[in-house]
Image (tube, rainbow, N blue to C red):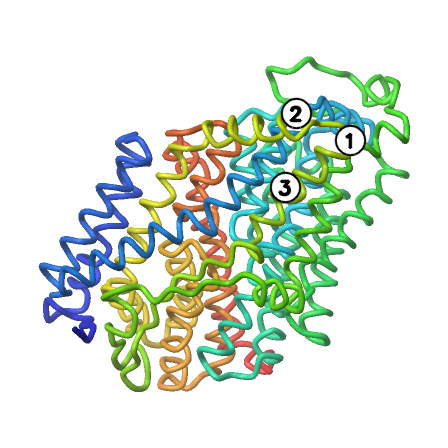
């Protein structure tokens, strides 16, 4: 059975796009306005997607069900596997008492909550994004902030807002590599173009992060730290993306950002120590720093799990290591009734193209496996018995079991809209905006990430459409394709996958709607700013495109 996607089932693109958006509106509306539990909202969105796809888009029911099952499987592996193992490492450090020492070392370096947010949510999160991506930075950063004493909602929101500017170069440049493969545009040009867009936001996001957390006045009190963290990352992001390639942009930028911020703190500290209102008030950071700092040995042991985690995540992200591990253990299963059975059609692609649907069970090379291995090695080095490690892991599994089901349901919704062609209808509606398309081009990427949960998936989904539309309108296809990735990063904080990961990491199961309400306008405002930048680059500064 084969089926060719249709993109305007109602005969009017605007109304078809509204109908295609119905499953997303059901999901996000249920979460944000009706306070429905996340798994119920996901199931309602999935049901609406199946109904629209089969009844309106005339997608055969067996294909629609296969797409949903494929999405659910992808939600559990690799996404759910990353979440489970990341929380396991955190739970291990808490159970052994080492996270208390981590908190003390960070507090001795910077007891100000604003500086802690910059270090963890922005700089360290960028390192994890560059090395692994796929929800790892949100899971780890949010869990660490919770452990430091941040309230669950601020911890989740800060981890999501901080995980924006690095996303386009995440997982060793995977989104840009996928974009080049889909569009056929030169990889080095796409890397350079994204590197001429995102550095503006790499400087902006640290200020935005602290403003959202503490307000404008509190932000200006730490402007040297915000500027240091953002500018150091932005400079490296621009240089590496333009003169080397997309592979180590985030890792190099994050390391420089962390070192620059630590160096600044040796010579500068905020005049007042900012804490959350419900915390004990401190008049000066001197009193906090006067407390006994952990010894070097205590600090080394406490940070050992996180050092091992960072090392293994980095190694697992290297293409050579990944290929080697895949030669040992890799299972690729074509999805029955779905693989090669759905054809994408013009104008989304130049010529009809069969969609692949292969479930990749790379259990050894998966990022989640590196996190599990980091937890096992760390536990044994810290003197935890194997039986106790198993017990901690099972407790973690019990804690996140319903959230894993929620992730599976939300990814099932995303895959149904993708294979059903609903997302392409919304993309074509954006592409019909004429001379304003450079402004809407990043918003299309934003929508793609909000739908799929991945900048890589958004690039695969809309990269060709961006390129074709740009050529028809007479401006740079490299600019449009890069804008899809740059705008997409701002949708990362509101996609269903990220919301669930953040809620799990902060112990807020069924509070995804509250997190969404907290970050939605930040996401939209930043995406609009990317649109303004791309509009200027298209018409006022066209020479910026390679």
The residue under the point 49% across, 38% down is 502
Between residues 405 and 499, which one lies in front from this camera angle?
Answer: 405
Rendering quarter of residue 438: bottom left
**SS label for mark 2:** helix
Q: In the rendered view of the protein, which quadrant contains the N terminus?
A: bottom left
The image shows a total of numbered marks equal to: 3
The residue under the point 39% across, 45% down is 496
Q: Are marks 3 and 1 in contact (CB under 8 Å)?
A: no
**SS label for mark 3:** helix
The residue under the point 32% across, 80% down is 349
User: Which of the marked residues, 2 or 3, is nearer the chain's N terminus?
Assistant: 2
For disc 1, the neighbor class at 10 Å (few under 14, some 14 to 19, many from 20) is many
Could you say where residue 383 lies in the image, as x and y percent from the top left?
76, 28
Tell which tag, 3 or 1, sits nearer the viewer: 1
Q: Is residue 532 left or right of residue 432?
A: right
Residue under label 3, please give it: 121
**SS label for mark 1:** helix
Q: Is residue 402 above or below residue 546?
A: above
Q: Is residue 84 above or below residue 323?
A: above
Between residues 177 and 526, which one lies in front from this camera angle?
Answer: 177
User: Which of the marked residues, 1 or 2, is nearer the chain's N terminus?
Assistant: 2
Q: Is residue 21 left or right of residue 98?
A: left
For disc 2, the neighbor class at 10 Å (few under 14, some 14 to 19, many from 20) is some
For the residues labelled 3 and 1, the Cα–Cα distance comes to 19 Å
Between residues 362 and 291, which one lies in front from this camera angle?
Answer: 362
Residue under label 2, please give it: 94
The residue under the point 55% across, 43% down is 138
Q: Are marks 2 and 3 in contact (CB under 8 Å)?
A: no
Residue under label 1, please give it: 302
Rendering quarter of residue 217: top right
């Amino acid at each position: 059975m084969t089926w060719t996607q249709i993109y305007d089932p109602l005969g009017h693109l605007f109304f078809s796009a509204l109908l295609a958006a119905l499953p997303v509106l059901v999901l996000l509306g249920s979460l944000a306005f009706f306070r429905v539990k996340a798994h119920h909202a996901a199931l309602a969105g999935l049901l609406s997607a199946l109904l629209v796809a089969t009844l309106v888009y005339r997608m055969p029911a067996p294909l629609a069900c296969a797409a949903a099952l494929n999405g659910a499987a992808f939600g559990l592996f690799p996404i759910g596997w990353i979440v489970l193992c990341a929380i396991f490492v955190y739970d291990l450090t808490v159970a052994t008492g080492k996270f208390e020492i981590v908190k003390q070392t960070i507090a001795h370096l910077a007891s100000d909550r604003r500086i802690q947010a910059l270090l963890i949510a922005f700089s360290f999160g960028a390192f994890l994004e560059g090395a692994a991506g796929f929800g790892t930075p949100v899971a780890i950063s949010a869990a660490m902030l919770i452990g430091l004493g941040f309230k669950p909602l601020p911890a989740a929101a800060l981890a999501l807002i901080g995980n924006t500017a690095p996303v386009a170069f995440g997982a060793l440049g995977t989104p840009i590599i996928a974009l080049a493969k889909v569009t056929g545009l030169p990889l080095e040009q796409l890397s350079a173009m994204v590197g001429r867009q995102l550095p503006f936001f790499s400087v902006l996001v640290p200020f935005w992060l602290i403003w959202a957390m503490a307000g404008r006045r509190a932000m200006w009190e730490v402007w040297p730290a915000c500027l240091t963290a953002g500018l150091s990352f932005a400079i490296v992001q621009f240089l590496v993306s333009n003169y080397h390639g997309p592979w180590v942009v985030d890792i190099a930028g994050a390391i420089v950002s962390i070192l620059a911020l630590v160096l600044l703190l040796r010579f500068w500290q905020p005049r007042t120590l900012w804490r959350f209102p419900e915390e004990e008030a401190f008049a000066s950071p001197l009193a906090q720093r006067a407390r006994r700092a952990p010894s070097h040995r205590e600090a080394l042991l406490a940070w050992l799990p996180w050092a091992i985690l960072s090392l293994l995540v980095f190694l697992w992200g290297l293409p050579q290591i990944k290929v080697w591990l895949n030669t040992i253990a890799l299972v690729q299963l074509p999805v029955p009734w779905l693989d090669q059975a759905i054809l994408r059609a013009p104008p989304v692609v130049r010529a009809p193209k069969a969609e692949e649907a292969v479930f990749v069970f790379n259990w050894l090379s998966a990022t989640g496996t590196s996190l599990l291995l980091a937890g096992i090695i760390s536990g044994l080095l810290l003197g935890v018995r194997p039986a106790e490690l198993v017990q901690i892991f099972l407790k973690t599994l019990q804690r996140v079991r319903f959230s894993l089901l929620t992730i599976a349901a939300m990814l099932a919704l995303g895959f149904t809209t993708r294979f059903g062609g609903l997302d392409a209808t919304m993309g074509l509606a954006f592409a019909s905006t004429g001379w304003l398309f450079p402004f809407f081009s990043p918003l299309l990427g934003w929508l793609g990430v909000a739908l799929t949960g991945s900048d890589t998936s958004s690039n695969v989904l809309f990269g060709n459409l961006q390129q074709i539309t740009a050529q028809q309108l007479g401006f740079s296809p490299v600019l449009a394709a890069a804008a899809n990735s740059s705008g997409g990063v701002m949708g990362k904080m509101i996609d269903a996958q990220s919301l669930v990961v953040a809620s799990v990491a902060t112990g807020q199961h069924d509070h995804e709607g509250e997190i969404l309400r907290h970050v939605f306008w930040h996401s939209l405002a930043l995406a609009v700013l990317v649109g303004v930048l791309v509009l200027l680059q298209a018409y006022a500064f066209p020479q910026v495109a390679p």
